[in-house]
Image (cartoon, rainbow, N blue to C red):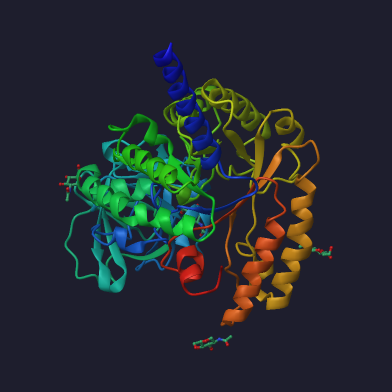
């Protein structure tokens, strides 16, 4: 009897400890959180040095190049934007004159044109942009004369492309060069822009070389001490961006590197240790839900949600993550998708996915919140409210920056503050409805376009945002914990007394 009683007692105590531990670990709403950006999903601008060891690191997947013939003094264009031949007679360069790289290795590339076809050389030497996928004849070696930003483009037949006097471009030039203005195989190259996301770092190094570099990054960039710092400074949760390939760890599809899953496991352990909630945020979905590097887009294309199979694959990723972490007392929320961009991400496919993704989380957890990101560039910020409002513990995520829009370029300190207090405040109350879903400002930052602002001005700016976004019923999260750009680093902002 006695031993049964005491067994019962210990069992109850155990239950109690377990439950109270859960209660202690789940932060009260609204949360004050910080994003762990640039950790498990690479963004070059957050930590550029990660790319330093890549040969020709300015020629990564998705890099956009324009080629101007030095003899014809004209830009190379894909006629009609693709589906026809190449010419070299344009005086100005825009979409049809821009070529996106697919990198095979540091010197060998495919060239994708505006209409998404690939440039190739035919057996008669003519150069066309007609292939829907690249093969051997769509493969080119870029030979640089870097000091002058000049290149020659060698086709698979071993001959160079040349700009002819009739403006045509052919792949039939065999002579060597001294890079002079008289050489029809020499092109002056403008690099318009490039991407530095997970695809670029993995394929830029090649998976074998990227593996130790990323594993080292994962284990040194964010460590247990950061979780201690976060909790000691009054923050209650972390939002952790992850990429879809994490679900096929340890051997994700090429070029991705395995091992991010163990890192996320460690994050949960530390979060439990320091009583922080974790918001798992699917930041990069298969096919990419926006054209930006942070969705791991290969070349700026956005194809997420364009097929049922793609949506089902994304639901699988959520199912996997929810199943793995449902038992952790620190699992606060699963964010189904970060920043899908309208109109390419249609409301219809998004709702299908959010419904299925929500159910996938609920299969494993009745407690975790499920966060649904509003579409970027959506004409209607309330478009998810009715749908999400019907789902228990659903949250709508909105991101507020006074950047990424030329309107802000000339804003003064006061105009920025007013914009937060008036426009973003009203935008937030438009989505924060009684009986509606909870709301989350999942990204904001104390950075603006004001040159040379004083510390006091920046403090006021940060405080204003915390006041306004503090009205979000789920809470807010700063973007991001660490960044070489000081204002984007919450750690730097806290350590230097800008944010307390
Ligand atoms: C460029 O050359 C092609 C082929 O000769 C011609 O059809 C086209 O009209 C030319 N375009 C310009 C802008 O000169
Ligand atoms: C790059 O790929 C091409 C085509 O497969 C190959 O011929 C070349 O040797 C490779 N170069 C390097 C540096 O790996
Ligand atoms: C911001 O709010 C003010 C006051 O309501 C309004 O006059 C202004 O047009 C708004 N600005 C934008 C860009 O919506
Ligand atoms: C900001 O400060 C920099 C460096 O001190 C200076 O060169 C620049 O002119 C300043 N800009 C403005 C708008 O005051």
**Which of 285/427 is in front?**
427
**What residue is drawn where x is 16% and y is 62%?**
176
- Which residue is depicted at the point 57% across and 80% down? 455
Residue 194 seen from this side: no
The quadrant holding residue 244 is top left
Residue 470 x, y percent position in the rendering? 68, 56
Residue extending farthest to the top is: 1
The answer to whether 95 appears left or right of 465 in the picture is: left
Identify the image quadrant of the N terminus: top left
8 to the left or right of 407: left
Is residue 480 toward the left or the right of residue 454 in the image?
Answer: left
The number of callouts visible is: 0
The quarter of the image holding the C terminus is bottom right
Residue 415 in the image: x percent, y percent?
Answer: 73, 73
- Locate residue 164: give its quadrant: bottom left
Q: Nearer the viewer, residue 183 or 113?
A: 113
Q: How far from the left and from the top, in percent, is residue 253?
A: 32, 33
Q: From the viewer's perspective, is residue 403 above or below residue 398?
A: below
Residue in the image at 39% along x and 51% along y? 39
Asked if one can make out residue 53 in the rendered structure from this viewpoint, the answer is yes
Q: Give percent across and percent down for residue 153.
A: 28, 55
The residue lying toward the viewer, choosing from 213 and 26, is 26
Above/below status of 8 relative to 120? above
**Residue at horizontal 46%, vertical 64%?**
491
């Amino acid at each position: 009897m006695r031993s049964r009683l005491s067994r019962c007692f210990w069992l109850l105590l155990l239950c109690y400890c377990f439950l109270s531990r859960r209660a202690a670990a789940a932060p009260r709403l609204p949360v004050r959180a910080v994003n762990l950006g640039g950790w498990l999903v690479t963004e070059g601008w957050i930590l550029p040095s990660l790319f330093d060891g890549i040969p020709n690191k300015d020629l990564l997947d998705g890099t956009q190049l324009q080629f101007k013939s030095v003899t014809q003094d004209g830009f190379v264009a894909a006629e009609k934007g693709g589906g026809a031949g190449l010419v070299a007679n344009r005086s100005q360069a825009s979409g049809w004159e821009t070529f996106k790289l697919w990198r095979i290795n540091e010197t060998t590339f495919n060239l994708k044109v505006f209409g998404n076809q690939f440039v190739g050389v035919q057996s008669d030497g003519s150069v066309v942009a007609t292939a829907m996928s690249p093969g051997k004849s769509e493969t080119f070696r870029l030979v640089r004369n870097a000091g002058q930003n000049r290149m020659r483009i060698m086709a698979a037949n071993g001959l160079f492309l040349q700009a002819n006097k009739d403006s045509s471009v052919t792949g039939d030039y065999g002579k060597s060069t001294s890079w002079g203005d008289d050489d029809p195989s020499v092109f002056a190259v403008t690099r318009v822009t490039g991407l530095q996301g997970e695809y670029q770092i993995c394929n830029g190094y090649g998976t074998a070389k990227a593996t130790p570099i990323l594993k080292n990054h994962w284990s040194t960039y964010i460590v247990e001490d950061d979780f201690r710092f976060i909790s000691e400074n009054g923050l209650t949760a972390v939002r952790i961006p992850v990429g879809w390939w994490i679900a096929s760890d340890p051997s994700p599809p090429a070029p991705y590197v395995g091992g991010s899953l163990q890192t996320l496991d460690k994050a949960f352990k530390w979060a439990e240790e320091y009583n922080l909630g974790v918001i798992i945020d699917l930041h990069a979905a298969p096919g990419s839900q926006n054209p930006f590097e942070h969705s791991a887009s290969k070349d700026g294309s956005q194809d997420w949600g364009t097929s049922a199979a793609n949506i089902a694959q994304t639901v699988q990723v959520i199912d996997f993550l929810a199943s793995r972490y449902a038992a952790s007392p620190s699992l606060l929320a699963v964010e189904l998708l970060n920043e899908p961009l309208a109109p390419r991400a249609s409301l219809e496919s998004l709702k299908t996915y959010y419904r299925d993704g929500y159910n996938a989380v609920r299969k494993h957890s009745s407690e975790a919140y499920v966060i649904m990101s509003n579409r970027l560039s959506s004409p209607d910020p309330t478009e998810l409210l009715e749908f999400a409002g019907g789902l228990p513990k659903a949250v709508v995520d909105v991101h507020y920056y006074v950047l990424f829009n030329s309107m802000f370029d000339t804003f003064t300190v006061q105009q920025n503050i007013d914009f937060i207090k008036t426009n973003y405040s009203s935008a937030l109350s438009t989505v924060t409805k009684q009986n509606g879903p909870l709301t989350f400002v999942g990204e904001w930052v104390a950075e603006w376009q004001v040159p040379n602002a004083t510390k006091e001005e920046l403090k006021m700016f940060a405080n204003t945002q915390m006041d306004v976004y503090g009205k979000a019923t789920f809470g807010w999260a700063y973007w991001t914990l660490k960044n070489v750009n000081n204002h984007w680093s919450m750690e730097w902002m806290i350590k230097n007394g800008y944010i307390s």
